Image (tube, rainbow, N blue to C red):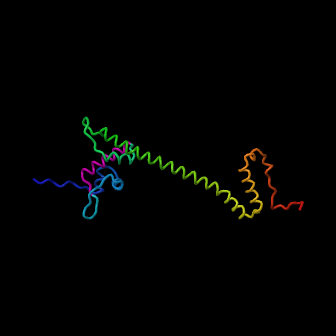
């Protein structure tokens, strides 16, 4: 007696059976967690193995595992243990190693981003006085006065003893106001 071909479900039927949206099934396919067969018209068709795999994915997600963790777990088979199914010690070690490698790679990226952010912040702080000068010039302030201010600010930064002086010692006469002695 010939065996009946496996029952194949459409996205809508599979989603309904699993209690999720069709978009959820498509998303897991996009992530490479499931590869359903296709009809001649290119429609997705899910068999019992696909549904079991989805069930496993959904259980792991409901337990709070990240999608990356689920991806690593799905790669490994479960073993029959005490009437249930569990990962072997070897599988757990492989999952651990794969996730630890991802965390290490992310730590490296984070450190590179921190360095890049620090460089960007430094460049921004270097550009801020230039932008301030240009905005003040565009607002009509005297160029000679503004340039003198910039020179004094640079000299103050270069001279460590300048921090000990009183602020009134650094006052610059307003170059826009004519000197009465002239």
The one of 52 and 69 positioned closer to us in this rendering = 69
The one of 104 and 11 positioned closer to us in this rendering = 104
Residue 152 covered by magenta stretch? no
**From what the image shows, is residue 98 above or below residue 35?**
above
Tell me the residue at 78%/46% (across/down): 165
Q: Is residue 56 left or right of residue 150?
A: left
Tell me the residue at 26%/57% (across/down): 37
**From what the image shows, is residue 8 above or below residue 87?**
below
Give residue 8's position: percent from left, percent from top.
Answer: 23, 55
Q: Main secondary structure of the magenta part?
A: helix
Residue 61 covered by magenta stretch? yes
Q: Is residue 17 left or right of residue 141?
A: left
The one of 7 and 82 positioned closer to us in this rendering = 82
Give residue 19's position: percent from left, percent from top.
Answer: 32, 49
- The quarter of the picture where residue 152 lies is bottom right
**From what the image shows, is residue 76 above or below residue 41?**
above
Q: Which residues are magenta?
A: 45-63
């Amino acid at each position: 007696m010939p065996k009946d071909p496996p029952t194949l479900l459409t996205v809508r039927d599979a989603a309904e059976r699993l209690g999720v949206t069709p978009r959820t099934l498509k998303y897991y396919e996009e992530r490479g967690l499931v590869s359903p067969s296709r009809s001649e018209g290119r429609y997705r068709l899910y068999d019992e193995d696909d549904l079991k795999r989805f069930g496993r994915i959904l259980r792991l997600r409901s337990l709070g595992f990240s999608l990356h963790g689920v991806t690593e777990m799905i790669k490994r088979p479960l073993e029959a243990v005490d009437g249930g199914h569990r990962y072997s010690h070897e599988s757990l070690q492989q999952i651990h190693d794969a996730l630890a490698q991802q965390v290490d790679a992310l730590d490296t990226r984070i450190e590179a981003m921190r360095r890049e952010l620090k460089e960007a912040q430094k460049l921004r702080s270097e550009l801020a006085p230039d932008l301030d000068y240009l905005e003040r010039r565009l607002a009509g302030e005297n160029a000679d006065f503004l340039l003198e201010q910039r020179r004094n600010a640079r000299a103050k930064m270069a001279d460590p003893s300048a921090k000990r002086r009183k602020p009134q010692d650094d006052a610059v006469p307003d170059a826009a106001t004519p000197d009465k002695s002239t």
